[in-house]
Amino acid sequence: TDPINVICIDNESDVSSFAVTKPKSFYADISVVESLLTPFSEGLTATGGYCLIDDSTDLSLYGLDSPQYIYTYKFGDKTFKIELSKQGVIDDGVYACRVNGGNVIYKVSVDSISFIIENVDELRSTILFSVSIKNVDVFTANYGGKSYSYNIELEDIETDDGTKSESTVVYSMDGEELDTESFQNIYMAIASVSPTAYADDGGELSNEPYLEFELKMTDGSVNTVKFIKYNDRYYRMYLNDIGDQLINYSVVDRLISYFDTFNAGEKVNSPALYD
């Protein structure tokens, strides 16, 4: 089985702070990654021990000559390794466990190792795009060889009683105020994009984007969403150059049509990406 590589990333995407980089490329579900970290957040408790390891120890008796599961954690310059196996272990509900190549084979209850995953797709985040529009300063759409930038501002307005103020989002291009409802409808359409399938490879960006969104955040960071041709049926979607989601051509073309309508000064009603 190919090793699964999960990294901690610094991003403002509101999707996840973790990403899988091997054998696929996608954002990881935070709750699943947190479960992988339970040996450090909650500890890993042994119910007993099988033996002390010496030169005469046959690791195959415990399945540790070729462990079923190997978890390697890197924190800065420190590395921790947990090896687990049920092969050859006669006790029900117990795994043989070795930590950091130590000289003890422990008994670990299956109840204390809920962090075990069998398939890389168990780590997948179901959220593709989730960035609050109020945290965006400038939204830019690039397609068809052109670039369209929309400024986003929060303006305070007084409530009816005049005692409080609320913030409303104002959209503009080249100093001209734009229709708020239309832009928000397009933004919700982007957020509703969902994959039809997933790519199997690691995810190198080999082509120029057919459609690209660049979001300059209020804190100065930048998020990008790219749709790059994958085959004659799908575009591959990348969020900050990470992603293996395959989006149907018709969906991406429909997003572009919404921007064409909006840029022509026409209203965009609540769009339906999927018929």
Image (cartoon, rainbow, N blue to C red):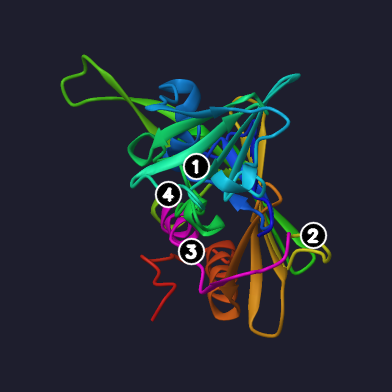
Distance of label 2 from label 3 (alpha carbons): 20 Å
**Residue 247 x %, y %:** 57, 71
Pointer 3 local density, CA inside 10 Å: few below 14, some 14–19, many at least 20: many
Q: What residue is rendered at 50% in x and 56% in y?
A: 118
Mark 3 lies on residue: 193
Specify the label residue 131 is tagged with: 1
Q: Pick whichever, 140 or 156, lies toward us.
A: 140
In this rendering, would 114 be left or right of 97?
A: left
Pointer 4 local density, CA inside 10 Å: few below 14, some 14–19, many at least 20: some
- Image-quadrant location for residue 72: top right
Mark 2 lies on residue: 205
**Relative to 12, residue 4 above or below:** below
The amino acid sitting under disc 3 is: Val
**Residue 195 x %, y %:** 51, 68
Closest to the camera, between mark 2 and mark 3, is 2
Does residue 185 show up magenta in the picture?
yes
Badge 3 vs badge 4, beta-carbon distance below 8 Å? no
The magenta stretch spans which residues? 184-202
Mark 4 lies on residue: 180
